[in-house]
Amino acid sequence: MKISQARYPIEDVLVRITREIPSSCTDLYRMARHVFSGLLVALLLLATLPKVVAADAQSHDKPEQKTEAQKSTPAVFSEADAARLLAEVQQALEGNNQRRFLRLFDSRRMPNYAAFQDQMAEFFEKYEAFRVRYHITQTSTEDGSGVVLADLELEATPAGAYVPNVRKTAQLRLVTAWDGKAWKIVDWAPRSVLN
């Protein structure tokens, strides 16, 4: 049996495939039809693949957008928020990290923040090490602000001096405000604990 030249490229592919089929296959037409249908399915998949990839990429490109109401709605201040905030205060003080400590405060909303910042600069220069213990006694929300009451014990080691550690205890009252991302301290009372 002599195979003639094909008129179309796909026929050329089929002719090449059928040449490689062993002579034991008796139904070449049926075999060619299966190969052709397989190629057709592959072409259809290739034609639809860019559309599927584009749709998938668009769904991943759109960031989750919050509505204005969700952005402006303050979170509810909970005991877990109070514990997290006081733990961050403890870590900043015990790490002797003034910058980290001041980041816990809302400089725009806190009254006399500039004076407080100066007081903290003196405080961190005066003492070289801190040990903090606290016990949260109450958390509440007042007029959209979170309020924490805690028993605070602060032990400070004076810098460069051979004097005993200074120990201060106080009933701490922190007022916090939601800044859109986290609760920030807007008032610390009594401030005398940080002298």
Image (tube, helix red, strand yellow):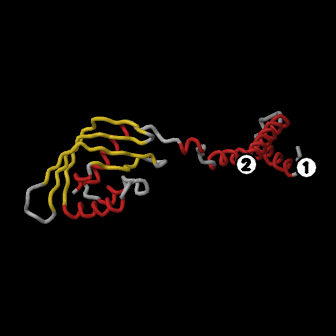
Decide: marks 2, 1 in contact (CB < 8 A)? no
**Which mark is drawn over residue 186?**
none
Residue 7 at x, y = what percent?
A: 92, 51
The secondary element bearing badge 2 is classed as: helix
| Residue in the image at 66% along x and 45% along y | 56
The nearer-to-camera label among 2 and 1 is 2
| Residue in the image at 89% along x and 46% along y | 2
**Which mark is drawn over residue 50?**
2
Crowding at label 1, few (<14), some or many (≥20) Cα neighbours within 10 Å? few
The secondary element bearing badge 1 is classed as: loop
Q: In this view, does 76 lie above or below 15?
A: above
State which tag comes first along the sequence, 2 or 1: 1
Q: In this view, does 125 lie above or below 34?
A: below
Residue 44 at x, y = what percent?
A: 78, 43
Q: In which quarter of the image is residue 163?
A: bottom left
Between 32 and 133, the one lying in front of the other is 133
Crowding at label 2, few (<14), some or many (≥20) Cα neighbours within 10 Å? few
User: Type of residue at label 2?
Assistant: Pro
Residue 1 at x, y = what percent?
A: 88, 43
Between 154 and 60, the one lying in front of the other is 154
Q: Is residue 160 above or below residue 13?
A: below
Classify the position of the C terminus by image quarter. Answer: bottom left
Between 20 and 95, the one lying in front of the other is 95
Residue 58 at x, y = what percent?
A: 67, 48
**Which mark is drawn over residue 4?**
1
User: Type of residue at label 1?
Assistant: Ser
Q: Disc 2 and disc 1: Cα gap in Å?
A: 37 Å
| Residue in the image at 29% along x and 48% along y | 189
